[in-house]
Amino acid sequence: MKLNFENDYYKKEALEHLKKYNYENNNTVEDAFLLVLKDIKKEDLSNLIILIQETFIKKYNLKLTENEAYEITQKNGLKLEYKKLLLELAYKCIDNGQYLGNNTIMDGRINTSSWISHSLFEGRLCSQLALKDGLDPETAKKIGILHDYGRKYTHSFEHVIVGYEKLIDLGWNSEAIACLTHSFINGNRCANNEPAEEGFFIDDKGNPQWEENTAKDDITKFLENYKYNEYDNILTIADLMATDRGIVSPFDRIEDIATRKKPDVKNRAYFIAEFTNKLNEFMGKVYKNKLTNVELTKATKDISLEELMKQFKIVSDKFFDEYRRKVGKGDGSLFQPHNWLWKSVVIKFDHIKKFIYMNVWKLIG
């Protein structure tokens, strides 16, 4: 899919980003969350509204109607106390295993606020990883919450461009860049679950290349011009661990996405190799020692996708183990096996595209 900006203004802003903006600024996490909530329908926030009503009775002795509670989520100029309260209640909602609302589409298969839950989990994970990496956790949390802003308007891959443009319009130029970077490892025009662009290929040495005279789209030009910082690196890792129900291992997240979106063969091996290296790099930097025997991985012609997946799983398992031990320890809201399993275990057979769902709530509950 070609990803081009709507006009030259957005393109210029993206290509000149390094000269002008930084994620670390005065925009707050709370205001970022209010941007997400703005113009979301009342039925998509029904569970959050109930929590607001209950909290206002207990905390302020105020009985709010459903509409009054909803208006708080949409109001400009809220006091900081109320902004913090809204974010706190949203996390309380998803930590209790609920979406912010109960509205669904496609015969109940998709909750319309699930993307917000994913963004909240990702924001918190970004914050935790940033703290371990010596970065500002609030800055990381802010871009984690806003990275999928475009999904308010579309659930196609164009959400990366749409989210960027909408945030630019709102004056959040710095944070808008996170919408463009979160789907691409190391800034290469290669996403886990999207078809390769025409003219893009991986050479025999495992390096990304473009055929001569290929007309590149705007997102490619941006990625070639932009240098990922540590916040971007954390964001790409967190995006492949945060679901709409909690935090899972990178391997499980990748496998889950593959059940819903057919991976592109041309992109797949390269993406898995790069993601494996990114996880290894982060562990080496943060934990100061080599935690796996997997060396730098390249998607060369003499290594199979199966072997790359084996290496990826080794690194993923170790990364997730370290995350639970050093980041998620003592914080049940970060690691939620009950949530991400949807109270079930998914067993995937290697050669059969079939899933068997087994209720094991009594075993894991």
Image (spheres, helix red, strand yellow):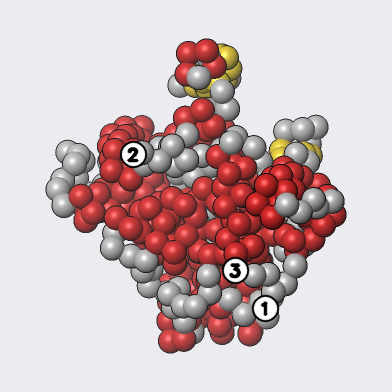
227 left or right, relative to 108? left
In the rendered image, residue 20, in percent from the top left (x then y), is placed at 46, 86
Which residue is disc 2 drawn over?
A: 329
N-terminal-most mark, 3 or 2: 3
Quadrant of the frame with the N terminus: bottom right
In the rendered image, residue 27, in percent from the top left (x then y), is placed at 53, 74
Residue at point 33%, 58% (across, down): 131
Given residues 56 and 188, the one toward you in this image is 56
Q: Residue furthest front?
A: 61
Using the image, tell me which numbered label, if any, was put on residue 105: none
- Disc 1 residue type? Asp
14 left or right, relative to 49? left
N-terminal-most mark, 1 or 2: 1
Task: Confirm whether residue 316 shows in the render.
Answer: no
Q: Residues within 10 Å of mark 2 (few under 14, many from 20)?
A: few
The answer to which quarter of the image holds residue 87 is: bottom right
Residue at point 36%, 38% (across, down): 330
In the rendered image, residue 335, in percent from the top left (x then y), is placed at 43, 37
Q: Secondary structure at mark 1?
A: helix
**Mark 3 → mark 1, Cα distance in angstroms:** 23 Å
Which residue is disc 3 drawn over?
A: 80
In the rendered image, residue 7, in percent from the top left (x then y), is placed at 68, 80
**Mark 1 → mark 2, Cα distance in angstroms:** 39 Å
**Mark 3 → mark 2, Cα distance in angstroms:** 30 Å
Which residue is disc 1 drawn over?
A: 169
Given residues 165 and 111, the one toward you in this image is 111
Residue at point 49%, 78% (across, down): 26
- Disc 3 residue type? Leu
- Disc 2 residue type? Lys
281 left or right, relative to 359? left
